[in-house]
Amino acid sequence: MYGSRMFSIGLEVFNLEGMSNAGCKSASKKVITKVDWEKKLNDVKIRKEDMNKLVMNFLVTEGYVEAAERFRMESGTEPEIDLATITDRMAVRRAVQSGNVQDAIEKVNDLNPEILDTNPQLFFHLQQQRLIELIRSGKLEEALEFAQEELAPRGEENQAFLEELERTVALLAFEDTSNCPLAELLDISQRLKTASEVNAAILTSQSHEKDPKLPSLLKMLIWAQNQLDEKARYPHISDISNATLEDPNV
């Protein structure tokens, strides 16, 4: 609640008396007490419907289908997409995260074949992840054959793909891949990165934002506070998780 209101009154504080002109610099910052600040926040009216849409957007984009269904029933907020599609999208995401890349590719094609047909970078990254999983499981000969047959032709057509392929194939040169310079490719974070890319592509194909709005709003809050720090001393939200206002240092 405070986060949205805080950002809404940002421009008002930017125009504090004697501070709005770029050529005029005050020797000391204006101090706004917690009481006065809360009054300003309470003057900003935010519709509950807008907040509910923000929550629903987060639940849908991140794939919390059960929570989204419960929230729809409790708040009456309708999601922008069919909730049934979230289950399919999350199945793809889980497949990548568990290393079942071929299964993920098949599921994507079942959802919409055009996703991979029109996104060569995504398809390459999925095939690259398949190669990584083969190396992870110790199937080195199969990995090398897969790289030559499936990835090398794409590398010949795209320099960026070739560089990524060479970097991945270099894993085959190390007996202990866990301590090699390219070990991050075998880390779970690489799976999550690929899964997020697939998730974003599916959302885009469904005419939905690929990123939830809530994190962007929180980034705007942090940016607004950083800007306001130059203008005045006021109650900060230091812990975004609970949005507690802290008194300014006087």
Image (cartoon, rainbow, N blue to C red):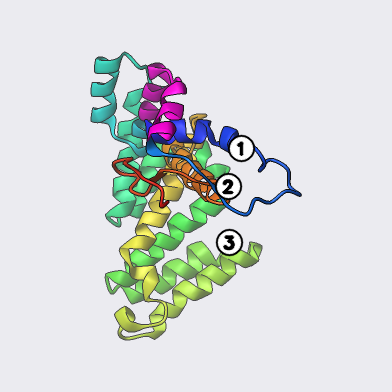
Q: Is residue 183 above or below residue 52?
A: below
Does the magenta-highlighted stretch encompass residue 55?
A: yes
- Badge nearest the viewer, 2 or 3: 2
Q: Which residue is mark 1?
A: 16
98 with respect to 120 (left or right): left
**Residue 168 on image: x %, y %:** 45, 72
73 with respect to 193 (left or right): left
Cβ–Cβ under 8 Å for marks 1 and 2: yes
| Helix, strand or loop for disc 2 | loop
- Badge nearest the viewer, 1 or 3: 1
First to last magenta residue range: 35-57
Q: Is residue 43 visible?
A: yes
Label drawn at residue 154:
3
Check disc 2 and give the amino acid type. Answer: Lys
Check disc 3 and give the amino acid type. Answer: Arg
Q: Residue at x 41, y 43 (%)?
A: 235
**Residue 194 on image: x %, y %:** 42, 54
Q: Which residue is mark 2?
A: 231
Q: Quadrant of the N terminus?
A: top left
**Residue 188 on image: x %, y %:** 31, 62
